[in-house]
């Protein structure tokens, strides 16, 4: 074995370890679950964050906003209701949705 051949292997191993640990951190990030909070708490969270991704169930999530300032150009506000611990339909704020283009025929 050549004296310098250890270094490239060590660099590759370190790069792989760094990539795996960064991916694990991103995967571990959790979104607040609306089912674990009251309607008022969920509404307050959207109002204080202006835009936030919330889980509404084990496999469902969406981005909720408090005003049109959090939407992209060409998007409009669509009222959003989510289930919370104390309400089956809590008016949490809005979702940003694409504007529909009207046909001019």
Image: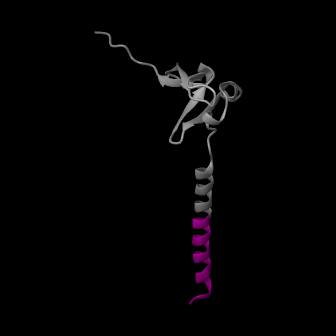
Pick the residue in front: 12 or 46. 46
**Residue that sits furthest to the left in the current view:** 105
- For image coordinates 71% across by 27% down, the residue present is 48
Q: Left or right: where does residue 104 sit relative to residue 88? A: left
Check the picture and name the quadrant holding the C terminus: top left
- Position of residue 42 measured from the top left corner of the image (x, y, whole percent): 66, 28
Pick the residue in front: 40 or 79. 40
Residue 62, quarter of the rendered image: top right
- Position of residue 97 measured from the top left corner of the image (x, y, whole percent): 48, 24
Task: Report the magenta residues as a range.
Answer: 1-17
Q: Left or right: where does residue 58 sit relative to residue 69? A: left
- Position of residue 85 measured from the top left corner of the image (x, y, whole percent): 63, 31
Q: How is the image coloured?
A: one colour
Q: Does the magenta stretch include residue 59?
A: no
Pick the residue in front: 7 or 13. 13
Q: Does the magenta stretch include residue 15?
A: yes
- For image coordinates 37% across by 13% down, the residue present is 102
**Residue that sits furthest to the front in the current view:** 86
Residue 22, quarter of the rendered image: bottom right
Check the picture and name the quadrant holding the N terminus: bottom right
- Position of residue 73 measured from the top left corner of the image (x, y, whole percent): 53, 23
Q: Main secondary structure of the magenta part?
A: helix
């Amino acid at each position: 074995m050549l004296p310098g051949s250890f270094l490239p292997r060590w660099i590759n191993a370190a790069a792989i370890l760094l990539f795996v640990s960064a991916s694990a951190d991103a995967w571990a990030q959790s979104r607040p679950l609306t089912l674990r909070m009251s309607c008022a708490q969920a509404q307050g969270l959207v109002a204080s964050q202006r835009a936030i991704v919330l889980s509404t169930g084990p496999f469902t999530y969406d981005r909720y906003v408090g005003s049109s300032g959090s939407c992209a150009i060409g998007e409009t506000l669509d009222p959003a209701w989510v289930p919370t611990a104390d309400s089956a339909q809590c008016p949490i704020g809005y979702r940003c949705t694409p504007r529909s283009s009207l046909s001019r025929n």
